[in-house]
Image (spheres, helix red, strand yellow):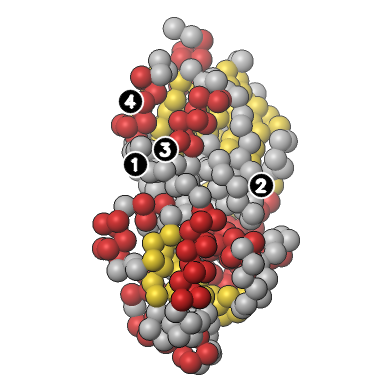
Amino acid sequence: MRPEQILAPKILAPMPSGLCSKAGGFHIDPTRPVDKALITHGHSDHARAGHGHVLATQETLDIMRLRYGENFAGSVQAVGYGETIDLNGVRVSFHPAGHVLGSAQIRIEHKGVRIVASGDYKDVADPTCLPFELVPCDVFITEATFGLPVFRHHDAAGEIRKLLHSVAVFPERAHLVGAYSLGKAQRVIAMLRAAGYDKTIYLHGAMEKITAYYQERGIDLGAVELVRGAKKAELAGTITICPPTAMSDLWSRRFPDPVLAFASGWMRVRARARQRGVTLPLVISDHADWDGLTKTITATGCSEVWVTHGEEEALVHWAHMQGLKAKPLAIVGYGDEEESEDPAPAEAGSEADA
C-alpha cells in the first residue's frame, strides 16, 4: 500500500459537514456552517453563508458578498492563485479550475502527501475565467456531474452558431436563452461577442449584479441591458439571457413568440430538452465532460481518486479499470446547479422586478 493511501484519510476526510481536515482545522466547501471554510467557487452548492472564517479567491469572496450580503461570514481572507499558506502545519494553495470567475482547485500537502480538491472544473476554453491548471497530486478529488460516456460536450462555439442562425432565420421572434446566473450566463454572452454578435443583449434581473461584477473585473461583454421596460415589439429579433425556469413562467409572456433555448450540458439528452419545452438545446457546460474527467484524472498522475458527487459509480468503475484506487464520497448537498437557477436571497429582489 502506498503511503498516501494510509495518510490521505488522516489529512482530509468526508464528514457530514463535507470534506474536513482535522489536522489543518478546516473544511473545504462545507455543507453546513463551520469555523473555518476554504471555498472553491461561488455557486450556492459549494459556497454557503454562515461560516466563522472563509478563505477563497478575491472573486469568490466578492461573489459570495453579492449573493449573501456583507455579513456572509465572520471574517474573510483572500488567497491569490499559487499562494501557499500554512494552516496548522498543513500547506494549502489555490489554483485555477476553469469553472467560473474566481473558481479554484485547492491543493493540500502534509507529510509529503499531495491532495487536490478540484471543486467543479472544466478543461476547455472559457473567455470569462482563467483556464484550468493541471496540478500533479497523489489523491485527486473530482466531481462527476457528467461522469458517463454519453456526455461529450464537443464544440461550444458551434452551439453559439446554432443560436445565431436561429436568430437570423426568425427575426420576428425573441430568443430566450436559459442559463445559470453565475458563470454560464456571462460565458454565453462572451461567446456571442466572440462570434461577432454586437447588438444589445437583454438580461433577466437575476443576472444583473453578477454580470455587472464580471464587467467590473474586466470581462468584456459588450452592450447588455435589463429587459425591464422594453416593449414587446422591441424584443423581436433579440436575445435575452434568463434563468431556465423563467422561460416557463408569466415573465416570458412579454416576448413575441419566443424561441426557448437552454445552455446546459444536460441538453445532450434529448428527453431533458423535451421535458423542459426547450426547442433549441445548446450543449454548453461549465463542467468537464466524460473525456475531460478521465483525461484530467490520468494527467494528474494520481494513484487514488475520490468522487464527490454526480455519476460517482461510473467514474469509480473507470478508475478501477485503470488500476487506480477509487471511492465515491456521496457528499449530500453538491450538484444540481446546472438544473437550478434559483437566485440567492440578494439576487431574488432584482429577479422579481425583471
**Mark before the other along the chain sequence, 3 or 4:** 3
Towards the viewer: 181 or 253: 253
Q: Amino acid at mark 3?
A: Trp
| Residue 354 percent coordinates (x, y) | 49, 81
Along the polypeptide, which appears first: circle 2 or circle 3? 2
Q: How many other residues sit within 10 Å of disc 1, few (<14), some (14-19) or many (≥20)?
A: few
Task: Identify the mark nearer the N-term, 1 or 4.
Answer: 1
Query: With 257 as the anchor, is 171 left or right in this view?
Result: right
Whole-percent x, y for residue 344 in the image: 48, 64
- Would residue 216 be found to the left or right of residue 169 on screen? right
Q: Are marks 3 and 4 in contact (CB under 8 Å)?
A: no
Q: Which residue is mark 4?
A: 317
Provide the secondary structure element on which disc 2 rests.
loop
Q: Is residue 219 above or below residue 322?
A: below
- Regarding residue 168, the answer to whether it shows in the image is yes
Left/right placement of residue 260 relative to residue 133 reads left
Asked whether the beta carbons under mark 1 and mark 3 sit within 8 Å of each other, the answer is yes
Q: CA distance from mark 3 to mark 4?
A: 13 Å
Disc 2 target residue: 130
Q: Which residue is mark 1?
A: 150
> What is the three-letter code of the residue carrying label 1?
Val
Above or below 137: residue 176: below
Q: Are marks 2 and 1 in contact (CB under 8 Å)?
A: no
User: In terms of sequence position, does the residue under pointer 4 or pointer 2 come before the other?
Assistant: 2
Looking at the image, which residue is at 58% across and 38% down? 105
Mark 4–mark 2 distance (CA, rounded to whole Å): 31 Å
Dot 4, how many residues are within 10 Å of its Cα: few (below 14), some (14-19), or many (20+)?
some
Q: Amino acid at mark 2?
A: Leu
Look at discs 3 and 4 and give the one toward the viewer.
3
The residues bearing labels 2 and 3 have C-alpha atoms spaced at a distance of 21 Å
Q: CA distance from mark 2 to mark 1?
A: 27 Å
